[in-house]
Image: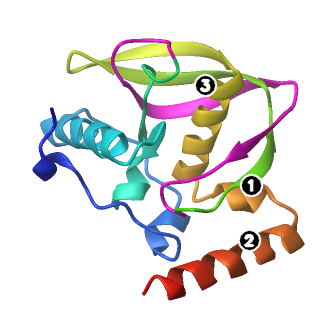
Amino acid sequence: MKEKKDVLPIRILGDKVLREKAQPIEDLTDEIIKLAKKMEATMKMANGIGLAAPQVGKSIRLFVVDTEYLEISKRPMVFINPVIVEKDGESVFEEGCLSIPGLYADVIRPKKIVVKTFILRRKKLVEREIEADDLFARVIQHEIDHLDGVLFIDHLPPEERAELLREWTKKRHSMG
């Protein structure tokens, strides 16, 4: 069981780090490995399926995915410097985000993708090309968006985005 000290604070909409384009990771350091482990613990504690480094205040191209929840693997997958190289199809699905708690909307994204990335395996980087579809593809795209300073609400029509943000702001103010 992860300890509370391993859980990082999640940045919320309005924090400027969420709108920055994250920097590529040049070298795998112990600090990055520790960050990935803490991000896994943070994602689990927050009941998320994915978490990108900018969401915990680090503007680097790294994210974690709960592949156990997706029934792909027993342990979370750490993506470093991912790039989508192919997209196919279209899918509409309701998305939410740990950085915009309580806000959900249907988002159109490609149904299938191929992503080139480095995966962290046993403290080593392994280059991979991963084919993903459905929810796995959606999670990867959502997290790569975070690395580019894009939030899921940016994919919505302007009127819908504005209405959702008004609701979210009202909820946030009523909670104190």
Q: Are marks 2 and 3 in contact (CB under 8 Å)?
A: no
Q: Percent from the top left, x then y, of residue 151?
A: 63, 58
- Residue at 48%, 74% in the rendered image: 16
Name which residue type carries label 2: Leu
**Which SS class for mark 2?**
helix
Cα gap from disc 3 to disc 1, whole angstroms? 18 Å
Q: Please tell me whether residue 95 belongs to the stretch shown in magenta.
A: yes
Name which residue type carries label 1: Ala
Looking at the image, is mark 3 or mark 1 nearer the viewer? 1
Q: What stretch is highlighted in magenta?
A: 71-100
- Residue at 36%, 24% in the rendered image: 76
Give the labeled residue for mark 1: 105
Q: Are marks 3 and 1 in contact (CB under 8 Å)?
A: no
Q: Percent from the top left, x then y, of residue 162?
A: 78, 77
Side of 27 where 132 appears, left or right: right
Residue 159 falls in image quadrant: bottom right
Q: Residue 164 carries which label?
A: 2
Name which residue type carries label 3: Phe
The C terminus is located in which quarter? bottom left
- Residue 59 visible in the displayed image: no
Residues packed near mark 1 inside 10 Å, few (<14), some (14 to 19) or many (20 plus): some
Side of 78 where 144 appears, left or right: right
Give the labeled residue for mark 3: 136
- Residue 13 visible in the displayed image: yes
Q: Foreground residue, 88 or 93?
A: 93
**Looking at this rendering, what residue extends furthest in the front direction?**
174
